[in-house]
Image: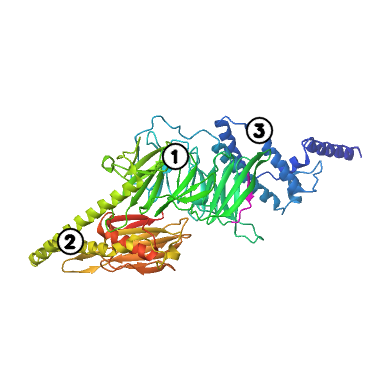
């Protein structure tokens, strides 16, 4: 009997000792001990702690907030479950087996940790400080597309066909290089976060310096808008059970939550601060404008919809420019359209009959840099600085520049030019004396008329001489005959340009494709020949192939394809791309493959592979006749194999 009592005593002591480890622990703590957060949560927590320490931020405050969320996790998932004093972790796990709440809670906890990391990065100092004075050149080791700048940091992202590079603007040092594409992605104001296109659709938010993917969202990078010190605004698929397909949300990075914005729109094209009203923003959606107000409370930001109204101002165009003081935005759509952000007034600036196809901000809010031309067969683009208050035009002296591919660099508040593999930062634009806008336009028209008269005389002389040359070349070498053939083709293109001039005087609303072209981008690709084509005097022509990749964009696309020699245009239309129509032209007929449901129309013998010649004028005139709009983006080469549109 004594032996039995001893055994029972030992067991009682063992049980008591087992329970001692649980003394003082709350029910929630014991549940979390038994079912701890998953490895992904713990890894995110560790990375955030490292980041907080590195930036000297409040690690203890974060730990307290994290523990509060763990307690909430146990309460919500454990509900009425009470852990007995002597229960083991194994028995608790067995009792709560099959409870999916823990996995769902862990997913929410991981998103909160990710947003905390984003908040830390958004509020950190610039990735690279802005140097004074800035470097005169930003260099790359290859040609690139439109650069992406941070608003308040000395970094820029340059994109090629398949890669992008993060570059220090002062030293041109490549901070990081990666495969992928931006597709309209942007840098946060301090340059520490970057949005890029995800390989399987949607977008990724990266830590720009390391390339680590922090989050993915089912939205185009073009429609993800950073809010400095807050987070971002974007659209996402609506929850099941609702009548809407998408909803607009504010991503509150500091509080780690998403806040629905009660806006009746499928997406947001632009988010711009309202001048003079802190934490007020204008949200531009297709044909809709809303004002929201943000207010900071103890639980994070809240959103109030202040107003909502229809608008005819199209803010989705990639040619949108914002004044350096943030007071207005402008867009070039043939005419120059201005939207005043404070009072929401929309007007057309008085520059008719100039046809304006590009506009950039300048260091002065009263001045805009324009690319424009007068109507007619002499396709001579010029660049002007337009003063809104004085209504003057000062022509840019392009003889003092290595390139006229202009940009505006918001972080430096300077203009620049892209010259093949580098960006030249301009201290000032070289300008000729300013004139009243009406006088400058009249002078431009007269110079264009004189130039056309001179060219007409030159072409008449050339045609006369060409007849003599053709007779003399009858027994000449194939190479000589080929030169004559090309001269004849150039002459034919000029004649097309002259005959098409009346159609280029205005952009008719009755154009056959006017409905499709309303808010579409007109992108053109032109070559003389495909690099792998076969042709020549005495040789049967064989069409070469050119690959054209049509990328996703925030507006419908009308594609213009033209070549002198026959070309098989092989299109690859990416998922999400909105290809409305393909216009194909050429001196020798080409074919289009892979256009899907897009409408295909012929442009006759019109073709062009460089701006500024008669062939381009004729091509653009025919595009205007069919669409009511001029060509917006043009890529031209003598020969080619691959092009990418939607850059």
Residue at left 41%, top 46%? 164
Q: CA distance from mark 1 to mark 3?
A: 43 Å
For label 2, the SS is helix
Please provide percent x and percent y for residue 179.
42, 48
Q: Quadrant of residue 14?
A: top right
Tell whether label 3 touches label 1 (CB within 8 Å).
no
Please provide percent x and percent y for residue 133.
38, 30
Q: Earlier in the sequence, mark 1 or mark 3?
A: 3
Q: Which residue is mark 2?
A: 487
Packing grade of label 3 (10 A; few <14, some 14-19, many >=20) is few
Front label number (3 vs 2): 2
Q: Is residue 570 visible?
A: yes
Q: CA distance from mark 2 to mark 1?
A: 47 Å
Q: Which residues are magenta?
A: 255-264
For label 1, the SS is loop
- Which scheme is used to colour this image of the protein? rainbow
Q: Is residue 69 left or right of residue 530?
A: right
Q: Which residue is mark 1?
A: 365
Packing grade of label 1 (10 A; few <14, some 14-19, many >=20) is some
Q: Which residue is mark 3?
A: 61
């Amino acid at each position: 009997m004594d032996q039995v009592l001893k055994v029972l005593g030992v067991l009682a002591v063992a049980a008591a000792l087992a329970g001692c480890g649980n003394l003082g622990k709350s029910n929630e703590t014991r549940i979390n001990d038994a079912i701890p957060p998953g490895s992904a949560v713990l890894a995110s927590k560790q990375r955030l702690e490292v980041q907080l320490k590195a930036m000297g931020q409040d690690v203890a405050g974060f730990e307290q907030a994290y523990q509060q969320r763990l307690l909430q996790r146990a309460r919500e998932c454990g509900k009425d479950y009470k852990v007995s004093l002597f229960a083991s972790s194994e028995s608790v796990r067995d009792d709560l087996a099959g409870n999916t709440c823990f996995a769902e809670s862990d997913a929410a906890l991981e998103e909160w940790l990710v947003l905390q990391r984003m908040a830390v990065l958004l509020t950190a100092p610039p990735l690279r400080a802005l140097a004074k004075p800035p470097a005169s050149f930003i260099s790359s080791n290859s040609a690139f597309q439109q650069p992406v700048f941070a608003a308040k940091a000395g970094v820029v992202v340059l994109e090629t066909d398949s890669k992008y590079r993060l570059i220090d603007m002062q030293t041109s040092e490549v901070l990081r290089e990666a495969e992928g594409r931006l597709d309209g992605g942007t840098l946060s104001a301090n340059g520490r976060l970057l949005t890029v296109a995800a390989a399987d659709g949607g977008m990724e938010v990266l830590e720009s310096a390391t390339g680590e993917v922090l989050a993915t969202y089912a939205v185009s990078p073009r429609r993800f808008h950073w809010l400095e010190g807050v987070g971002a605004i974007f659209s996402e698929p609506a929850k099941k059970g609702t009548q809407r397909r998408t909803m607009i949300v504010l991503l509150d990075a500091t509080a780690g939550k998403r806040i629905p914005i009660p806006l009746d729109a499928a997406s947001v094209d632009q988010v711009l601060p309202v001048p003079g009203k802190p934490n007020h923003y204008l949200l531009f959606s297709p044909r809709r404008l809303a004002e929201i107000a943000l207010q900071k409370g103890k639980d994070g930001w809240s959103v109030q919809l202040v107003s909502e109204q229809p608008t005819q101002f199209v803010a989705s165009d990639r040619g949108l420019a914002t004044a350096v003081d943030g007071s207005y935005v402008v867009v070039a759509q043939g005419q120059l359209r201005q939207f005043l952000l404070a009072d929401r007034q929309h007007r057309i600036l008085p520059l008719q009959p100039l046809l304006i196809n590009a506009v950039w901000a300048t260091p002065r809010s009263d001045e805009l840099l324009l690319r424009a031309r007068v109507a007619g067969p002499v396709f001579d683009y010029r660049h002007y600085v337009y003063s809104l208050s004085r209504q003057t035009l000062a022509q840019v002296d392009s003889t003092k520049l290595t390139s006229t591919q202009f940009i505006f660099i918001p972080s430096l508040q300077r203009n620049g030019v892209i010259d093949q593999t580098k960006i030249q930062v301009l201290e000032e634009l070289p300008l000729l004396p300013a004139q009243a806008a009406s006088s400058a336009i009249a002078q431009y028209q007269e110079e264009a008329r004189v130039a056309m008269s001179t060219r007409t005389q030159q072409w008449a002389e050339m045609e006369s001489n060409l007849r003599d040359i053709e007779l003399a070349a009858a027994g000449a070498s194939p190479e000589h005959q080929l030169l004559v053939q090309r001269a004849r083709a150039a002459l034919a293109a000029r004649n097309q340009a002259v005959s098409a001039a009346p159609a280029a005087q205005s952009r008719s609303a009755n154009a056959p494709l006017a409905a499709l072209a309303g808010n579409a981008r007109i992108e053109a690709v032109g070559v003389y020949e495909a690099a792998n084509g076969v042709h020549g005097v005495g040789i049967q022509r064989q069409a070469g192939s050119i690959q054209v990749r049509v990328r996703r964009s925030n507006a419908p696309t009308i594609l213009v394809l033209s070549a002198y020699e026959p070309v098989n245009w092989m299109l690859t239309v990416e998922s999400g791309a909105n290809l409305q129509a393909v216009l194909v032209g050429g001196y020798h007929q080409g074919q289009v493959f892979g256009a899907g449901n897009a409408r295909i129309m012929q442009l006759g013998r019109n073709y062009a592979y460089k701006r500024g010649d008669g062939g381009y004028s004729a091509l653009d005139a025919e595009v205007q006749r069919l669409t009511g709009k001029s060509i917006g983006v043009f890529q031209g080469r003598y020969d080619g194999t691959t092009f990418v549109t939607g850059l």
